[in-house]
Amino acid sequence: MLTGRDKPIISALEYVREYCMKRIVNVLKVIAKTDGVLTPKAAEHFELVKKHAANLIVQWNGGPKYQVSCYLGERYGEQFVVDVIERTCTCRKWEIRGMPCTHAVATNWDMAANGLKVDIPERWVDECYWLSTWKKVYSYKIGPINGRSMWPRAHCSTKLLEPMYHKPVGRPRKMRRKDEMEKEDSMVKDGKLSRKWKTVTCGSCGGKGHNKRRCTGQGSTAAQSS
């Protein structure tokens, strides 16, 4: 969208319309190749959730609640309560993300293993992540239009004059004007997002803690020794 910012208003609107047409077509191509319940990104993330849920221990209280515990690795001693009726977990990830956490997935598997009537874990994911919802969002199409030479002329009784325009010095800016709150943010310095607390990854050897200019091959050396 940055390309169309410096265009006149009609040309900018035409650019946006054509961009939306292309985007809808590109997404429809991805949808046609996708199978399953969830969108590709949601399915990829949910596979990681299910992978971590395999090591959890589930205990049923005889009602709608389950106690989920972990006794392996860094999560040793963690324990949460899952309510399958309210679809909540005390870790609060299920409510915040709209996607079942590892504890909810483990609960779903335990219910199925004990013969309870339960759907697949993907059905517990919020509908905003469903592939069917994605199809509905992009079901509306933007129609093509004729060129400007075929546009109907408007009959206006008032003669519209071009506005007075003074061409400023220098190259026109394309970047958007930042909000005052963005400028006051502690993470923003000189109008740019700060890289403080972020780990730098070298683009040459893939090592951490240095960039390409200061690379001496220490990342590749560490990988070979390990």
Image: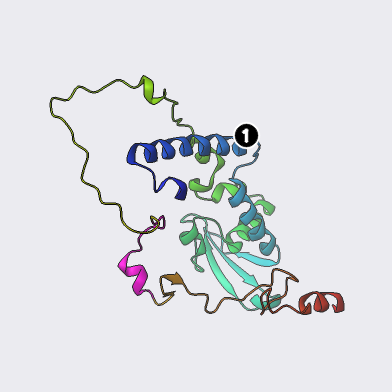
Q: Could you tell me residue 50's position as x and y percent?
A: 66, 58
Can residue 121 be seen by looking at this rendering? no
Q: Quadrant of the C terminus?
A: bottom right
Q: Secondary structure at mark 1?
A: helix
**Residue furthest to the right:** 225
Front residue (pair 223, 68): 223
Residue 62, by quadrant, is: bottom right
Q: Which span is picked out in magenta?
A: 173-185
Residue 56, by quadrant, is: bottom right
**Residue furthest to the left:** 157
Mark 1 packing: few (<14 Cα in 10 Å), some, or many (20+)?
Answer: few
Front residue (pair 45, 88): 45
| Residue type, numbered disc 1 | Ala
Q: Could you tell me residue 97's position as x and y percent?
A: 49, 59
Measuring 66% from the left and 51% from the top, which residue is drawn there? Answer: 112
Residue 161, compared with residue 64, is above or below; it is above
Measuring 42% from the left and 40% from the top, which residue is drawn there? Answer: 16
Query: Is most of the magenta stretch helix, strand or loop?
Result: loop
Q: How was this image coloured?
A: rainbow
Q: Could you tell me residue 37's position as x and y percent?
A: 60, 42
Can residue 133 be seen by looking at this rendering? yes
Residue 183, compared with residue 64, is above or below; it is below
